[in-house]
Amino acid sequence: MRLFFFEQWADEAALRAHFAVEGSKAFVRSLKGRIVETTGTRIYRAESIPR
């Protein structure tokens, strides 16, 4: 079984606010011991390209 999380945030401030919430921290802690293999967290910045 594999889980991939793809999330889109309005801006970097919103992303940082999300990671600061205790519920987010608790979720990550709850995964410890259940993850067999991970590539870690990668954060990418993307922007629209006008057509």
Image: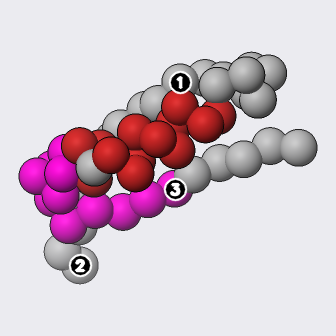
Please, which residue is most extreme toward the left here?
13
Instruction: Residue at 23% x, 78% y: name it.
Output: 51
Q: Nearer the viewer, residue 12 or 50?
A: 12
Mark 3 or 1, nearer chain start? 3
Q: Position of residue 48 (x, y in %)?
A: 23, 67
Front tag of 1 and 2: 1
Q: Which residue is mark 3?
A: 6
User: How far is the residue under mark 3 from the one under mark 1?
Assistant: 13 Å
User: How far is the residue under mark 2 from the one under mark 3?
Assistant: 25 Å
Q: Position of residue 37 (x, y in %)?
A: 74, 21
Count of labels in the image: 3
Instruction: Residue at 76% x, 29% y: name it.
Output: 34
Q: Is residue 48 visible?
A: yes
Give neighbour class at mark 1: few <14, some 14-19, many 20+ (Cα, 10 Å).
few
Q: Could you say which quadrant of the image residue 1 lies in?
A: top right
Q: Could you say which quadrant of the image residue 10 lies in?
A: bottom left
Q: Which residue is mark 1?
A: 40
Give neighbour class at mark 2: few <14, some 14-19, many 20+ (Cα, 10 Å).
few
Mark 1 or 2, nearer chain start? 1
Q: Which residue is mark 2?
A: 51
Q: Secondary structure at mark 2?
A: loop
Q: Is residue 49 visible?
A: no
Give neighbour class at mark 3: few <14, some 14-19, many 20+ (Cα, 10 Å).
few
Magenta stretch, residue numbers: 6-17
Q: Amino acid at mark 2?
A: Arg
